Amino acid sequence: MITVDHLTKAYGPFRAVDDVSFVCHHGRVTGFLGPNGAGKTTTMRVMVGLTPATSGRVTIGGLDYSAIPNAGRHVGVLLDASAQHGGRTGREILSLGALTMGLPSSRVDEMLALVGLTDAEARRRLRNYSLGMKQRLGIAHALLGDPEVLILDEPANGLDPAGIRWMRGLLKGYADRGGTVLLSSHLLNEVELIADEMILIGHGRIVAQGDKKTLLQGARGSATSLVTSLDNAALGAELHRRGHLVEPMGEGLKVHVPTDEVGRAALEAGIVLTDLRSGGVGLEDLFLELTSATAREGVHQ
Amino acid sequence: MTAASPAQPAPLLDVSRTRQIPFWRLVLVELRKSFDTRAGFWLLATIGILVALVEAIIMITAIVNDGVVFFEDFAGTAAGITSLLLPVLGIILVTSEWGQRTAMVTFALEPRRSRVVLAKLVVGAIASVATVVVMMVIGIACTTVCELLQPDLTFWQMEWWIPLAFVVTLTLSMTVGFALAALLLNTPAAIVVFFLYWYGLAIVLFVIADLIPAFTDIAPWINFQAALEPVWDWSLDSAEEIGQLAVSGGVWIGLPLGIGLWRILNAEVK
């Protein structure tokens, strides 16, 4: 639905976005991950025509953003929840959006209810909002026109854990109904649970993309398992006999093989497992590994 | 690193049943934005209150002194006050989007930015017309009071073109503020430049003309405020006056608005 094609945005010699290409499919949540300053926001801004691209192109459903009539009815955008007039109330901000898009005022009430802003909160001016409330209002604004595509920059920023869980459910449901969601974050665990597909960006370049499984398979470090059993010593010996590297960790063992191999070893040795999970390369390790070089460069600049 | 091509062709957005946002709705939105904040509301309220206050003082003075009252005087005084405050409204219409960064939202909803700018200009014109109407109403109210208290000294006479001249001049002076705001995209800077221009230019031109005698002939072609005078009097008839209005208007409206528009259309909206 969203096609980014060899997009480059340069500020003088500095390339904020460097030859980036990816596709966001409908019915899926695409996570756009990278450290601060990696080029996520710039890419999203180019998508909605706020920043002109140096070269390359972005289309949404085959169209340039500026060619979409009444854009808010097709593409919901939240780039910066604080970029609203501090003197307007939450309700007024949504009402202006509804008026622009030609929506009935009942839609404003629906959206306020959806994001859990009470009547009293909606009557307060934006400058008195917490960051979490601004994010909820921003999400309400993005959803106002019942769009097919959602572009959200750091939407979980400032939300409390309950809020993050709420947003996860909301976006998941939205994608399940056929919507396209692109959301960015610099925090992996925010996105890990919700994104069907992930795009990792560092220093303006895409460093990896795919679903979680593909990304982990492509990770350089091999998988590891964390295991606890009724007889750790015997299990350790069996795994060692099979030629695996075993080290004690906490109450159990850390083994440098996938979990199925540990299970097989336990089965053969007749040892009861009490806990077995993948402690392998988490997405976070992968993320740091992939972006560390670029992140360090960034620090020195 | 470039990504793999999509597994399936991306579905297209069905926009066949969506019409673009009609211009009148953009105007409606901008109109609402001009008074739904405290700054906008109080600017409009200040114009109204100030006009009412000054008119009341004139009226009371006239009544106390048994002075002669012309309806025209009330209208003229009000126009003088508003010609200073309407440009500020024109400025705020443009710059508040940048100061509060709402331009990001506005231009995401309507990527054809020139339509938004035009809608704002129409709102400025609507405000000018509305101000003239309010001025006339206050003028009629004051004259009516005088009529009741001293009918012999009250005269209702007014040239038919006066409201028209007010609308034209007020809209044009509002547009000067609007144009400077589009150029500078910053509220304080635009207000300072506008008032420097409005009050300072005459002095500057005078000094320059004193130093360079040849400049005396050029000055009327640059001073838009002076060129507006024949419009106030509705006596704009000579080709020279029309030319001066066009040239100075081009300098103070056309130039900043043109450059400002180019800037707005091409700027990265942060």
Image: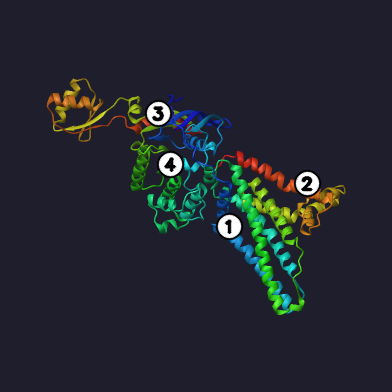
Question: Taking B22 as reference, is A295 above or below it?
Answer: above
What is the crowding at mark 4: few (fewer than 14 residues within 10 Å), some, or many (at least 20)?
A: many
In terms of image quadrants, where is residue B5? top left
Disc 3/disc 4 C-alpha distance (Å): 18 Å
Chain letter, disc 1 residue: B
Residue where numbered disc 2 is placed:
B247
Q: Earlier in the sequence, mark 2 or mark 1?
A: 1
Q: Position of residue B133 (x, y in %)?
A: 66, 62
- Which residue: 69% across, 74% down? B144
Is disc 4 on the same chain as disc 3?
Answer: yes
Residue where numbered disc 4 is placed:
A154
**Which-is-in-front pick, marks 2 and 4?**
2
Chain letter, disc 4 residue: A
Q: Earlier in the sequence, mark 3 or mark 4?
A: 4
Residue where numbered disc 3 is placed:
A209
Label 4 element class = loop
Disc 3/disc 1 C-alpha distance (Å): 48 Å
Residue A209 appearing in the image:
yes
Compared across the picture, whether A257 is left or right of B20 comes to left
Disc 2/disc 4 C-alpha distance (Å): 50 Å
